[in-house]
Image (spheres, rainbow, N blue to C red):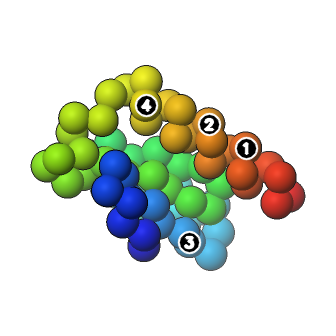
Amino acid sequence: MRLAGEFHIYAYKTPRTAAHWVKTMKAKGDWRQVDRFTLAWTARAQKFTSKERRTELVVALKEAVATQG
């Protein structure tokens, strides 16, 4: 896990494991999967991160994952 202030990022061994955690933790906050990573907004201060900013962060992670292919 990496706490980045604006969001949490978690890295898992496989995309399937990441998907499991997104499904499991969705009730506790906004969790989004990108490949074997998840981005989560569950801390009190993180609720102020806009939907647009969250989408920007997901897109940036998708681009980073794609370049590492």
The location of residue 7, given as percent across then percent down, is: 36, 52
Alpha-carbon distance for marks 1 and 3?
Answer: 18 Å
Residue of label 3 = 12
Residue type at mark 2? Val
Q: Looking at the image, which is closer to me, 41 or 15? A: 41
Q: Secondary structure at mark 4?
A: helix
Residue type at mark 4? Arg
Is residue 20 in view from this perspective? no
Alpha-carbon distance for marks 3 and 2?
Answer: 19 Å
Q: Secondary structure at mark 1?
A: helix
Q: Residue at x 45, y 61 (%)?
A: 9
Q: Residue at x 32, y 56 (%)?
A: 5
The location of residue 48, given as percent across then percent down, is: 22, 35
The location of residue 58, given as percent across then percent down, is: 55, 40
Residue type at mark 3? Tyr
Q: Where is 4 relative to 47, above or below?
A: below
Residue of label 1 = 63
Alpha-carbon distance for marks 4 and 2?
Answer: 10 Å
Mark nearer the N terminus (4 vs 1):
4
Q: Residues within 10 Å of mark 1 (few under 14, many from 20)?
A: few
Between circles 3 and 4, the one closer to the viewer is 4
